[in-house]
Image: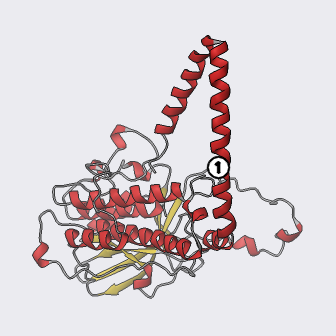
Amino acid sequence: MRSRTIERQVALVSYGTQYLRGQSALDDWHRHGTFFNARLQFRALADNALLADDFTLWLGILKASGATRLSLHLASAFEVAAARAAQGAVHVVVVHFPDRHQLWAVAEERAAWLDHPVFPNEELQRYPVFPDAAYYGGPIDSYWCLDDRPGQLDVPDTDWNALARAIAADLASPVPSSLAPAGPYFGTLPHDVPWATFPLFPSSGFTSRAHRIMATLARMQSTFSHDTNPKNDNNPYQFLDQEGAAKLTIWGRSLDSWMLEVQLRCANETRSIDLTGKNTPLARLHTAPSAHQNTADDGAEEDASSPEVTAEQGASTSNGKWGGRIAFIVKVILGSLAMIFLARLVAIYPWLAVPIVALWMLGARLLRQLPPQ
């Protein structure tokens, strides 16, 4: 489950908190590559007034107004609703003041003229009457101020060692993993531009373990997505019975849930020294949905662990299992015949060995460049 919106929120909240606390300047990080090709707008919910057309203006006004930090939470933790939104807010950015806190959430505004009386009946149209001219445009994160509440909101600190142990026990895999890249985690930056390459959230000696945990989960997600792709000949679903497919689906949902939890915690990490002794007991911020629920992150596409894919795989488990075995046997037979044919051909025309070996080496190189299994 990958979402560029949540990555932008992690960067906005973590770096924004440092700015509000005077630990960094906007010039130090506002060129962060995760914001490339995207616009962040901030609106008042009551009248849809555009308050700020960029996050730098938003943060500047917040700092001048006395804001002390930002934090990122699941919208389910608050009783909020974004009016006129095509899809409800998934996460809430909280702006903390000494005596109050504001709730901001991204929501997709729905065009009112879609319900205009003269709008053509789409059921009678073979193609859209009005093509989506903004299809190739960058995304817009339109933040709406949902509420301004009195009092302070507590944000618990994270015991990263305890979190790593909990994830490793649940997923039955080492966390952090030695296979994950060392150093800061950069997320899915759209361009390789040195001056825009920043860690997804601030990197320090204290946060190094948090970066390793997130890098480990990102690698596991990438591997899981590749392995369970229906176009993958080695898709494990085709070799599993219904119970095994359900377990694999649940494991994938748990992985996505842990990644979301780590993203929230990394966004809210503000410490520079280890205060493990003062951490609150580890409690889950997010739990994986059951196999019958269909939930997706804001802006994220459903992966191979979605219920629709699972149901389809489960319905054809038996056929898929035997079909995969028969296909493997056929491949072995065809491969053997091809080797015998090539051996005889090279014996007659020895010079053919050169292009055959060249093609074999090229194929081996391309296979090494594929994502790890």
Q: Residue furthest right?
A: 124
How crowded pointer 1 is (Cα within 10 Å; few <14, some 14-19, many 20+) is rated as: few
> How far across and down, in percent of the image, does residue 29 sit?
30, 50
Q: Is residue 372 above or below residue 314?
A: above
- Whether residue 58 is visible, yes or no, is yes
Q: Quadrant of residue 209?
A: bottom left
Q: Is residue 226 above or below residue 167?
A: above
Look at 63% across and 53% down and name the residue there.
231
Give the amino acid type for the residue marked by disc 1 in the picture: Ile
Q: Give left or right: position of 352 versus 298.
A: right
Question: What's the coloring here?
Answer: secondary structure
> How far across and down, in percent of the image, does residue 78 sit?
41, 85
Decide which of 181, 211 is in the foreground and name it. 181
Look at 57% across and 82% down and name the residue there.
292
Mark 1 residue element:
helix
Q: Quadrant of residue 342?
A: top right
Total number of numbered discs in the rendering: 1
- Whether residue 48 is visible, yes or no, is no
Decide which of 207, 220 is in the foreground and name it. 220
Decide which of 140, 192 is in the foreground and name it. 192
The residue beneath circle 1 is 329
Look at 59% across and 52% down and name the residue there.
232
Q: Is residue 49 above or below residue 358?
A: below
> How far across and down, in percent of the image, does residue 84 sit?
60, 78
> How far across and down, in percent of the image, does residue 295 sit?
54, 76
